[in-house]
Amino acid sequence: MIDEAVATSPGESFPDAGEFNRILGATEGKAGPRLRTILVALAPGAGLSEQLASLEKLGRFIVAGPAVETAGHEALVRLQMVVEALEKITAARERFQGVVHSVLSQTRAIKLFGEVGLPNDRGLLAETTDRLARKFLPEPPEPHELWRLAGSIVRRVDEIAWLGPSADLLLHRLAAAGGNAWEPLRASITDAISMIATRIAAAGMSGQFRTRTAVTGVRDSPLYHLTRAGHAEMPALIEASRRHLDRVRLALEATGVSIDVVYSLDTIERGLARIEMLLPFAERDDALEPTYEIRALLAEVGRGLVGARSFRQLMSDNFRLLARKVIERAGKTGEHYVTSSKREYWKMMSSAAGGGVLLLGTAVARFFVMWGHWPLFVDGVLSSAVYAGSFVLLQLLGFTLAAKQPAMTAAALAGTVRDKAGPERLEELGPLIARIARSQFAAAVGNVVAVVAIALGVDFLIQSVRGSPFLDEQTARAVIASYDPLGSGTIIFAALTGVLLWMSSLVAGWVENWIVYRRLPEAIEHHRHASRISKAGMVRLARFLEHRAADFVGSVSLGILFGMLPVFAEFFGVPLDVRHVTLASGSLSLSISSLGIDGAGLGNVIWASAGIVIVGLLNFSVSFALALVVALRARDVPRGERRKLPLAVLRRFLKHPFAFFYPPKDDPNLPPAHHQD
């Protein structure tokens, strides 16, 4: 423990090294002598560059100074040493206050508080070029910009890891030790609030944004009034602005979303949060108590300073915006139902059974293409046509394809994350994930049982008519061997197929959004040539585009991905293939029927069957995991919280394992399932 105060009287000279260490209770190590040297070097009468250098050394001492013995974070111990020195040694406190006041009076902090860590409109290419230049070229000095000093103190993200609740009291003691030295910051904070408010108001007044809100005029928008409000009025206007944004999000369902709208939403949301963070520091009569406010602002600015130099952070931010564009608008289409009742569950299974019957024809047609020994590109085109045609026909007949993960799932997950706050929102995902899992289980069972039964029956008829099975012995043995999970690339191919299933859902979601954003159905319905052609026909075409076009585009894109990926991979010498659980089950059933279990070998049949189970698990888990990552990333769920999700799902599974495979007793509180139009 640090000894109780050994206070020095005003005007007393700086204590020597021994006395300094005794005051702080620092009996060993380099931290005590280093801190004394730094505090002695603080010179209120020195030039700005010298004062900046001394404050940088003091900041670096706290975040990355000499090692100290502690069970917690070393930075907290070093911060405590600084606070104790300022509180107990008058000469140190006077020097600190003088230098801080001098530096803050001669520097600008508007960029530090109003720009650092907030979105900018420079674009990915311009920002990348700028970061490259800053990384490899010398930068001109900007001694009058406070963000330069802050950036030289915080250089890595792990240097602000100590900014947790345990730092709050120490930070408030440091603020108190500075006295009135912080006063020059207030004007910069006020200017930063005004600048952020003006920027987000401009974003909210853009044409694309205004068309998605119920506000009738510019002056009716709370974002507009935010630029003209006093600090006391701002909290209420911030809440009104957030309700305004909620109405904009609801309008996205009807009007579609562009990357500009997503960027505007992101800019406004983060700007409102920053204003909220700065307001407690803007008024002189706002007595700060030991709460999280100082720590939160330091952490936010620190992450922004590090992120401004990081290419990884740049790509992460852009990926987050793209992810939000994917899931911001909750799509209404897709073959996947998220079932909630037993009736919907069995309806899903019967729909999937129809899909299994149809996809046996797909597997048979694919064999005929393979036996044609076409040139590589022609083989890919024909395979794509077989897959796409089957998936489109499946769509027309209202059947279900197992593991086809549409953008709807990501939207549903993102909606839960958006509507809830705090760690409990992850618990809310548990029931939804269970519903998705059992829906996919029903689809897989329906597909596989139907395709296996029909394959065995069809091959029996073929053998009865022509005296030989559909597949010859060589092909049948090759098919069985290809599903061995250890002796083939089945595991890799199944995971890759999960990626393709997810990618096709993104294509479907993008097309649906594009159609709605461009108001294509409305334009076709009211086209000037509608009376010449057929008004009723134009209306039907408009409704088809609105409700079904995205489904068909997603099915066609999946067929092309399935058919062309192996071709392109072979062109580059990479042996890749697709493994979908239903198609694989049909092919394996035809092969076993051709050879018989004895002819194929019981061990080979068991291994191949195990491979089919693995294919089904990977098809679903990979596509679902990708949708989940997009949803959580788009909603800025903290990384630590994201890591807790698997444990939350596991707890749900251990508590209610049956619910992941079969619906429990109907719950009237469950939201209705998503149905295909």
Image (cartoon, rainbow, N blue to C red):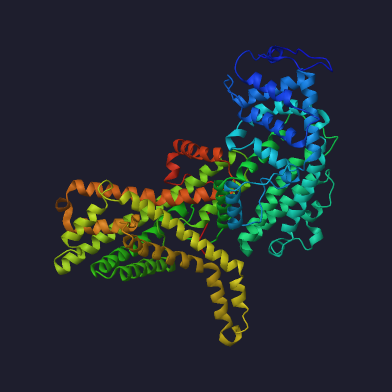
Report the side of 511 relative to 189 (left or right): left
Q: Quadrant of residue 574?
A: bottom left
Q: Quadrant of residue 514?
A: bottom right
In this view, the residue in front, 13 or 428, is: 13
In this view, the residue in front, 369 or 427, is: 369
Report the side of 1 relative to 609 (left or right): right
Locate residue 329, reporting x and y percent.
Answer: 59, 58
Q: What residue appears at the point 60 percent right and 85 percent down from the top-left corner?
A: 529
List the single residue furthest toward the bottom: 532
- Give the total number of marks visible in the rendering: 0
Whether residue 434 is situated above or below residue 545 in the rendered picture? above
Whether residue 87 is situated above or below residue 412 in the rendered picture? above
Q: What residue appears at the point 33 percent right and 67 percent down from the top-left corner?
A: 380
In this view, the residue in front, 655 or 334, is: 334
Report the side of 458 relative to 208 (left or right): left
In this view, the residue in front, 541 or 91, is: 91
Whether residue 177 is situated above or below residue 652 in the rendered picture? above
Q: Can residue 670 be seen from the camera position used here? A: no
Q: Quadrant of residue 74?
A: top right
Locate residue 363, reporting x and y percent.
Answer: 30, 63
Report the side of 26 relative to 364 (left or right): right
Locate residue 650, reporting x and y percent.
Answer: 46, 37
Locate residue 537, reporting x and y percent.
Answer: 54, 80
> Which quarter of the rendered picture does the N terminus lie within?
top right
Q: Can residue 210 be seen from the camera position used here? A: yes
